Amino acid sequence: MLELTNPIYLDANKAREHLESIQWPDGPGCPHCGNCDKARITKLEGKSTRPGVYKCKECRKPFTVTVGTVFERSKIPLNKWVLASHLMAASKKGISAHQLHRMLGITYKSAWFMAHRIREAMRDDKPSGPMGGEGKFVEADETYIGGKETNKHRSKRNSKNIGGMGKEIVFSLVEREGRVRSHHVPSVTAKTLRPILVAQLDAKTFLMTDDAGQYRHMKRDFAHETVNHGAGEYVRGDAHTNTVEGYFSVLKRGINGTFHHVSQQHLKRYLAESDFRYNEREALGVNDTMRAQAILEDIRGKRLTYRRTDGPHYGQAA
Ligand SMILES: [Zn+2]
């Protein structure tokens, strides 16, 4: 249950103190030079200073808890960032920028930027070692994301788009009872997919795929089993891809139900959000508060690859 009356969602100072306790459990550290020596950091408390400003005696630069994070240089009060993080963490299928705009009383454009920055915080940029291992099963499969050509505005239709053409391809690896890692890939060829599998999976992993051509010859690298969907085969003992297919159905429900349209350049952030939600799931003992805290722990050191002048695109309902 989200307690909306918690002061961290209502008061910018309380939100800042909350963020400081998560980011700096052992006291403030200088984001400019890395100095963590408490004796070499002063809290500035003059009347003319805004709260939460520290000064580093090593590099002589001032800083706050948001310097170097995805919340940096935002005019949106910090309590709204903390609330938006919690709302996105607690929502099962994601939350649209329109919803954030209405719930937080900020402009749609601000809500759109905010949501993308929080997705950056959700992005797992330091994956912990290879997936799978001896006696472990990893399922790999690909799916196509993108609107139907007939639903697009006439000027945006491409008559060559049939089947998977013109759609974006998502390639996901899911360890049974474990984590997912999704990739936005340019094609479904062995040449594209094999390097991802080799880089991401422990060589002792049991790899499960369907029998599509791109997965042939994977036996060279892994213990590989396939299911023949063409012949109506879906489960043969441990040989199935039900876990990754279940993941895709949740991903698509989120994208189609909440976002309507996801542009190609931003798809990787929706994948980051969807992977985050799966990896921090209830079944693994993670509740809403823990999931929100995981976001606030991971706001630092993320590079924002879109320009601040970028706006929501035409047809961008997300
Ligand atoms: Zn410093």
Image: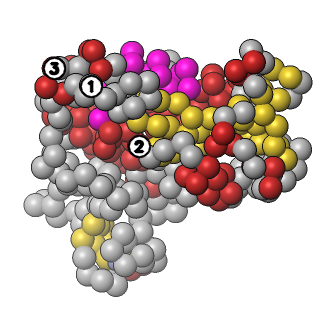
Amino acid carrying mark 3 in the image:
Arg
Label 1 and label 2: CA atoms lie apart by 26 Å
Q: Residues within 10 Å of mark 2 (few under 14, many from 20)?
A: some
- Of all residues shown, which one is farthest toward the front? 160
Q: Which mark is residue 24?
A: none
- Of all residues shown, which one is farthest toward the bottom? 58
Q: Which mark is residue 154?
A: 3
Q: Which mark is residue 159?
A: 1
Look at the numbered discs 1 and 2 and tell me whether their residues touch, using CB distance below 8 Å. Answer: no
Amino acid carrying mark 2 in the image:
Lys
**Magenta stretch in the rendered image:** 248-263
Q: Is residue 3 covered in magenta? A: no
Horizontal side, residue 212 vs residue 24: left or right: right
Task: Please name the predominant secondary structure of the magenta segment in the image.
Answer: helix
Label 3 and label 2: CA atoms lie apart by 26 Å
User: Dividing the image into 4 quarters, which one contains the C terminus?
Assistant: top left
User: Splitting the image into four quadrants, where does ligand 1 fall?
Assistant: bottom left
Q: Quadrant of residue 58?
A: bottom left
Placement of 29 over or under 158, stated as above or below? below
Q: Is ligand 1 within 8 Å of the beta carbon of the residue shown at mark 3?
A: no
Q: Helix or strand or loop: what does disc 3 sit on? A: helix
Residue 87 screen position, x and y as percent: 39, 27
Q: Which mark is residue 268?
A: 2
Q: Residue at x 34, y 19 (%)?
A: 148
Horizontal side, residue 219 vs residue 156: left or right: right
Q: Residues within 10 Å of mark 1 (few under 14, many from 20)?
A: few
Amino acid carrying mark 1 in the image:
Ser
